[in-house]
Image: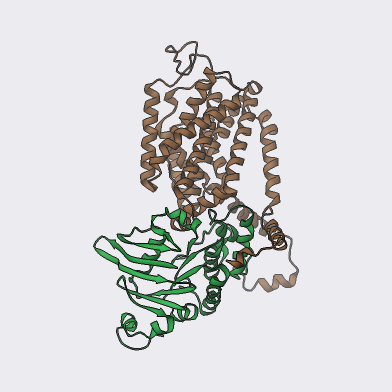
Chain colours: A brown, B green
Amino acid sequence: MAGLDTKDAAAATVAGQRLALLRRPERPAHLSVIVILVLFVLFGLPPLMTGYYTGYATLVAIYSIVTLGLGLLVGRVGLYSLGQGAILQIGAWTGARLLFATSQPFPVVIVEAGLVTMAIGIVVGLPVLRLRGLYLALITLMMAGAITVVLATINFPNGGGGFTGYNGTTVHIPPIRRPSIAGTDPAYFRYCVVVALVMFVLVYAHLRTRPGRAWAAIRQSEPAALAAGINTTFYKLWAWALASFITGVAGAALAGQAHYLYSINFTTQDSIILLAVALMGGVYNLWGAVVAALLLELLPAVLQNVGVSYDWLTILFGVGVLLTLTTAPAGLADQFPKDMKKLGLLIWRLVRPRRPPSRQAEREPGGAT
Amino acid sequence: MIEIDNLTVRYGGVTSLDGLSLVFEKGTCGLIGPNGAGKTTFFNVLSGFVRSAAGSVRAFGTDLLVMPHFRRARWGLRRTFQTEQAIEELSVYDNVAMVHSALRGAARRGDVLEAIEFTGIGVSPGAKVRTLGAGQRRLVEVARAVAGKPRLILLDEPAAGLPDEETAHLAAVIRAIPEHTGALTILVDHDMSLVSAVCETTAVLDFGRLIASGPTAAVLRDEQVMRAYLGTAEEVS
């Protein structure tokens, strides 16, 4: 024990310096790329888009939060949830009700919707997280089905005052309000991008610190995690709660985007499609969530624009998941940069400046090309 | 000191530990025996992965078996695994810092870096484990075991599959553990040269029962031990 107790200030300083070296950002260029991209999306993109695409781009921002939560569960902790669509529905429902019943500022409502969804998520998660793999997927899918049925039966709120208000007729339904600073579609798009950004930063902060470490340990080896003193149940529940929170936030944002919510627009199938696109986008990479949201919301919009029916999507996603899992298991977000690098190398080989003749001659005899 | 009294573990009809009573005093103690003797089961009971059917384990006055398993690390129990369990996608630093319940606040960074340095792993603490070789991964596990204030360290075949020179380095590291941490270390290994190099005392299990214990050299010459390993009375080397 003596060896560990006798540490003087100098040694601590040295340790601090070593740690500073250790923790420097791995790729500073990476951060500037993200900043430029975000600035472009916030200020460059909205004027370029028609109203049609602005609506879908807003959905991409919102659904990227949902796939982020799902990616966190699947990729970082190894929990396969097929109930995220239902969690989103709870968030949307809570957000809509709070927006109808209270006059609180929109950001407050968004956070409250996240917290309520998180609380419900924890209640559901406590028994469910005892299961793993296929059984967890099965139970969460059934939960999604149950929540969908319940919300359809009690008439998913389409308007009316108070928390339970239901306007039986289909006329004169007041729209779900948006934040006062983001009433128009382009402004609301920017608003949702900022919300998504905050959620990404929240998840990133988790991944870089103690919970991220615990999740990585749990995913690879639960015995090792336990032996290291990690309370695996607690950290699994933490991941589940965080995913529920951000999905609830996304739900409230969705309520504002849609203006009107109908239970018919939320199906149990959504939860399955969500997992499919999350896997295609890539669950081990935060960019995967954005790619997944693009696949989920922008691809159908483009297809519809060129006259391809929405119904083709399920088949398309099925083939997509099969292709991704067999050829690029880490998803498009991981594979695309690699492919681009390869393509870049290939092009570079074709157009590179000629080498000095001596080296050319050296290569030619053995060259297969 | 750890006192094991009448420890019994059953898997269905198989009795893996059969009324084991044993005392490990201090320093580095060996635990050997043929395959299926119950060595890893013994570690798993101590870690809380396997429930005992009967018996008790008192470690430094604490009843270990009633503690929730994730609390045992905070108490000071550490272990490595037969199949190495360093977390690939984390850095060496994060792998060691995983033992977080036992390490708190400002002391943590220094403790983690000191543990890494102690193993002489020879790579940056920021290096990702997936880029390391088998020997270095074993050292990451050892660093995790000595980080913080361990009281009881269980090493489960740390040298399995390592070439001789890496085993020699590992042996030197293991030999230094008691002095460095003050912890009682129990080593399970099939490599008798490693066991005799680092363990002052050794206990031998066979079919879940204790068949010999005492100073390592004497135990390895014990007739019953040789019979358990080889079936004859030739010296075990």
Image coordinates for residue B7, horizontal then vertical, percent: 33, 65
Position of A252 compared to A145: left or right?
right
- The quadrant of the rendering that contains the N terminus of chain B is bottom left
Q: Nearer the viewer, residue B26 or A352?
A: B26
Q: Quadrant of the C terminus of chain B?
A: bottom left
Residue B122, x across and y down, in percent: 62, 69
Give the farthest residue toward the bottom.
B234
Considering depth in this image, is B212 or A28 the residue closer to the camera?
B212
Identify the residue at horizontal 52%, vertical 73% (top origin).
B174
The answer to whether B210 is drawn above or below residue B224 in the figure is above
Q: Residue furthest front?
A: B61
Quadrant of the rendered structure where residue A193 is? top right
Q: Is residue A108 depicted above or below A34 in this figure?
A: above
In the image, residue A89 sits, relative to residue B111, either above or below, namely above
Total marks in image:
0
Residue A253 appears anywhere in the view? no
* Left or right of A113, for residue A180: right
A12, A107: nearer the viewer: A12
In the rendered image, the vertical position of residue A113 relative to residue A214, given as above or below? above
Closer to the camera, A237 or B216?
B216
Q: Residue at x 45, y 52 (%)?
A: A326
Name, please, the residue furthest toward the left: B13
Q: Is residue B167 left or right of residue A28?
A: left
Q: Is residue B218 visible?
A: yes
